[in-house]
Structures are given as structure tokens and as C-alpha cells.
Image: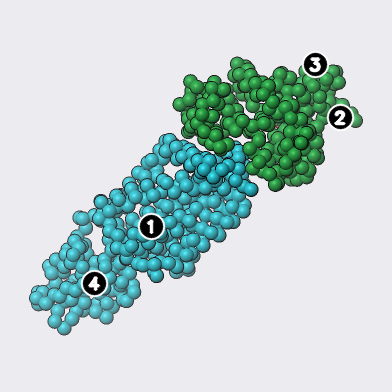
Amino acid sequence: MTTTAIQTRAVVKRYGSLVAVGGVDLSIAPGEGVALLGPNGAGKTTLVEMIEGLIHPDEGEVLVEGLDWKHHATRIRGRLGTCLQDAKLPERLRVDETLVLFSSFHGRGKDRAEELLELVDLGASRKQLTGKLSGGQRQRLALACAIAGGPRILILDEPTTGVDPAARRQIWDILKALRAQGATLLLTTHFMDEAEFLCDRVVLLEHGRILEQGTVPELLERGGATSLDDLFLKLAGRRILE
Amino acid sequence: MNHGLPFRLRLRALFLLTKAHLLEFFREPGILFWSFGFPILLSWALGMAFLSPKQVKTTLIVSKTDSVAVRVAVPDSASIALVALEGDDALRALRRGEATGSISLARDGIRLQLDTTTQEGIMARLLVERSASRGLLESITVRDPPARAGNYADFLLPGMLGLGLMNGCIWGIGFALMDLRLRKLLRLFASTPLSRVDILLSVALARATTLPLESVCLWGFGAIVFGVAMHGNWFLFVGSAAASCVAFAGLGILGASRVGHMQAAYGIVNALTIPMTILSGVFFSWTKFPLWLQPVVEYLPLTLACDALRAVSAEGAGLAQVGGKLAILMAWGAVTGIVGLRLFRWR
Ligand SMILES: Nc1ncnc2c1ncn2[C@@H]1O[C@H](COP(=O)(O)OP(=O)(O)OP(=O)(O)O)[C@@H](O)[C@H]1O
Ligand SMILES: [Mg+2]
């Protein structure tokens, strides 16, 4: 039996002399929700895309449900649902066409597309071209595409960036429901409230390394901070002093 | 290993992705004009420019030895131009329609070699009869020319077809892949269980759907408006078009393999298409270029494509004549395609 949904062991990714991810060990249990936080350029996207098998780590290894990407790529892809940072969708496809298409990638039929349409509440816009959707609608559609295959593990890179509070709430509710059904969730975000609402654990990343991790109250207490920004400033300051 | 989905479901996903590319293609504003209307319009404009019926000047070939004597009998005039050419040069001028026929002096009078089944041939004969010195008139003999006088539309249409196939593949496969990469769709598709082979295949299949449509429209137009006929075998003609597409698809994939910026995408596509459009003999024969350039031009994919298509359609060439060109085209496709796939970046 596998005991972890996602496991990274000392993964490193460099771009020239820049170390985007500098040796991260992360282990996420099945059904757990983990939020990855950190300033711009911290390496969140790079780490997440290595877990998604889109970037090959220079060092270390990534296991998804105990399987490694090198030998089990297709099996892993069947279990993952991913939402890429600023993912675009085919602009000149309609909403329903897009959902039928992405469902087919997972071997699912039109009925699945209907289910998804219902789930993300885009029924009224089913004939809209995706390029004409609002930012919030597009994010919901991207989420629907990510979960088309009914994945056990969801990896979402900033799923609510650029979305108004009402639409964010809608996305949260969908994700909360999926978590309640037992899905594992790894998401990156810049919002503390999002992390707190959706996840059990927060991992703070900076300069490609894990700075701190724990529940939100734990972290704030440990750092003697009142907010995420505050905490980051304090942690960064402390590191410089050391 | 690579097959996440059962075969039937995999085919369905491939079909739907191909259909998605087609929907995106046909919903792009202006696409119908650029891929269907523009080539036809250009062929029409060029064809008209060179087929003007008002043209009553005829060009006839004389051999260099006969030149002086013929010019005495039939003087150069506003309606008759005489050019001195020999052997292969003379044949080529006839095939390209640069000259209507040839004229020489025999013991018994003027001998014309003309195709009197064409309008140009009849006109040339009348012009000669009108201007020849009296005493020679009785004895004009007309023979078939040693080469068929090709008209410009016969020359142009296969060239336009080759050009359309090149643009269709390099824009439709090469640029389309770069566009998918830059819109991050390539990565999005690659993050699903869909196999990467199928993602690439879907782009090629979408093109394999639109290109035959575009080609049939263009050829149909030429056949109806300019009366361009097929002198060779249709299967060989379609085969030549397919081999050309293999070469252009390979080039497209190689060009698209690593590009990461829109600017570079346009740059690469233009760098691939514009030189060949100019050099490869789409609009006029590439043998007019300087000799030192010709060996390079001759083996460019678009040159090979146009030459093969033209040889089959205008001259009725068989596999024996064009087989070599088709083999080189496929080699172009195989080499560039394999290198392109090796270098290919999904993000
Ligand atoms: N393809 C690439 N080539 C070169 N450098 C890259 C590449 N991708 C990322 N980087 C660099 O790696 C570092 C980490 O980038 P990454 O996108 O992972 O950060 P992030 O935490 O996701 O930031 P954001 O919050 O802005 O999304 C950055 O300094 C970035 O410039
Ligand atoms: Mg990021």
C-alpha cells in the first residue's frame, strides 16, 4: 500500500546559475490538503510542474502514489488533475465543446461533460466561446477540465488569481466538495485565507527552499506574526541575521 | 506502455482534438480568405496578366544560321518578334510559352512550326502571312512544333498548388504548434493522459483535412477559368502533392521545435517560406536565376514540389521522371521531421 499521495525527495531544478528549486522534500498524505505559499519567483510553479511531470528535475525524485514519472507517466497522468498557472484554453472552442474534449482525454463521454458543466455552474454559458468568458468563468472552466477524469489528486497553480470574491467563493466550494470526497489537494496561492479554508497544511517556499511548514495558526504563532506578509518579512529578516 | 486509454477511446480523443483544431481554424476570422480565397485571387490576377487576349504580338524562334535570311523575308515588326535560339534553349522557350513556334527558310519557301490548334498559333500564322514578302507566300508550310507551347496557366497552377501546400503545412503545422506552445495549450494537453504522439498527430490530421479542400478549390478554379488540363496520371499527381506535404510538414515541425516567442515564431515561418516562394519557380521558371544559384534552388523542397507537380500535370511525366524528386521530398520530410521531434519542446 502506498502511504503518500505525493512525495518529492531532494528535488532540484536549475536554470543556468539560478536555482529555481533547491532540494525540496515534501510528502503529502492521501486526502490531505497542502497549500504552497511564497513570494513571486519562490519556485512554486517549478516545484509543482516537476510533480506534474512537466519539468524533469535535475536531481532528486518525484513519486505520485508511489509511482515514478520515468516508468509510469501514463498511469500517473490518469490519476492527476492539473490546473496550470495562467492556463489558456482553446479560445475559439465553446464551453461545452471544451468539456467534451477534455473529458475524452480521460476516456469519458458527453455525460461527463454535462456533469462538469453542472458542477462548475456554467450551464448558462455552454455555447459561449471560451475566449469570451470572464476571468472567473474561465477559471471555473479550467478547473472543470482539470477534474474531468475524476482525479484522486488535484494540483492547482494559483486557481483563483484574478478572480472576483464571489467567483473565488464558488471555486472554493467546488474544491471543498472534492476534498470532502477524499481528493488530495496541492495548491499554490498568494492568499492566506484560501490556504486556511482549503488546506490542512501550509508550506512556505522561498528561493526554492522550504522555509517553514505547519497549519496557519501554528505558523503565525511560531513566527509571532499577524499576517502572511508580516510572517514573510520576519522570516526573511531572521535568515539574513543568521 | 504509452497507451493509457483503450484503443477505441484513444481514437475518439484523437478525433475530438483534431475536430477542435478544425473548429478553431474555421472560426479564425479571415482564415477562409487567406487559405481559400487569396491563392485563387492571386492565380486569377497573374493568369489574366499573362493571358491577355489583346496581345497580338507573336514571338518566333529562328536558328542562328537562318536568322539573317528569315529577317529579310519576314521583317521584325510591331507584331512579330524573332529570337535566335538553338536546340534545348529553343525547346525550353516553346514549353514555357515564351515563343509560339519557330520559323525557318526552306528551298521552297517559309516553313512554320506552329500548333494551329491554339489561338496563339493561328494568330502567329496570320501575322506571318500578312508580313511575308509576296513571293514566299504560296509556299508556307505548317508543321507541329517540336514542343507543345505551354500556356502560362498550365505553368502557374501547379506552382500555386505547391505554394499552397507549403504554406498550408508550414503555417498549419509549424506555426500551429508554436502557437499551441505559446498559448500553453501544448503543455495543457500534455498534462492529460493523452499521448504526445496523438497531440502531434491531431495537428497533422487537421491539416490533412483542410489542405485537400483548399487544393481542390484552387485546381477547380484553374481548370474552369483557364482550362488547365491534367496531362498526366491523377494518382501520381496526388502522390506528388502528398510527398510534398511530407517534406513541408517535416520542415514545419523542425521550425517549430524550440521556438518560445511569438516574434521568433513569425520569424521562423517567414524565413522558411519567403525565400522558397521567391526562388522555387512558383511564378516563373527558376532556370532564370544565375547559374551558381541553380544547383541550390533545384533541391529546395518547394522547387522539387512545383517541378514534380508541373511535370505530371503539364507534361504528362510518369513515375520514372518524377520518382527521384518524390524520393528527395520524402527524405527532406524524414530528416527534418526526425530532427524536429528530437529537439521538440513541449513548454
Ligand atoms: N523556463 C525558465 N527559464 C529560466 N528561468 C526560469 C524558468 N522558469 C522559471 N524560472 C525562474 O525560476 C524561478 C522560480 O520560478 P517559478 O515560476 O517557479 O516561481 P513562482 O513561485 O511560481 O512565482 P509566481 O508566484 O510569480 O508564480 C524564478 O526566478 C524564475 O525566473
Ligand atoms: Mg508560479
Residue visible at 37% across and 54% down in the picture: B160
Q: CA distance from mark 4 to mark 3?
A: 97 Å
- The residue to which callout 2 is attached is A239
Which residue is labeled 4 in the image?
B145
Element at badge 1?
A: helix
x 80%, y 18%: residue: A217
> Which chain wears cyan?
B
Kindly state the secondary structure of the residue where label 3 is placed. Answer: loop
Q: Residue furthest right?
A: A242
Q: Is residue B319 left or right of residue B197?
A: left
How many C-alpha atoms fall within 10 Å of the one at disc 4: few (<14), some, or many (≥20)? some
Can residue A90 be seen here? The reply is: no
**Residue to which mark 1 is pinned:** B238
Q: Is residue A61 visible?
A: yes
Task: Classify A213 as above or below B110.
Answer: above
Nearer the observer, disc 1 or disc 4? 1
In the drawing, does residue B146 fall left or right of residue A112?
left
Q: Cβ(mark 4) to ligand 1 < 8 Å?
A: no
Image depth: mark 2 or mark 1 in front: 1
Q: CA distance from mark 3 to mark 1?
A: 73 Å
Q: Residue at x 60, y 38 (%)?
A: B192
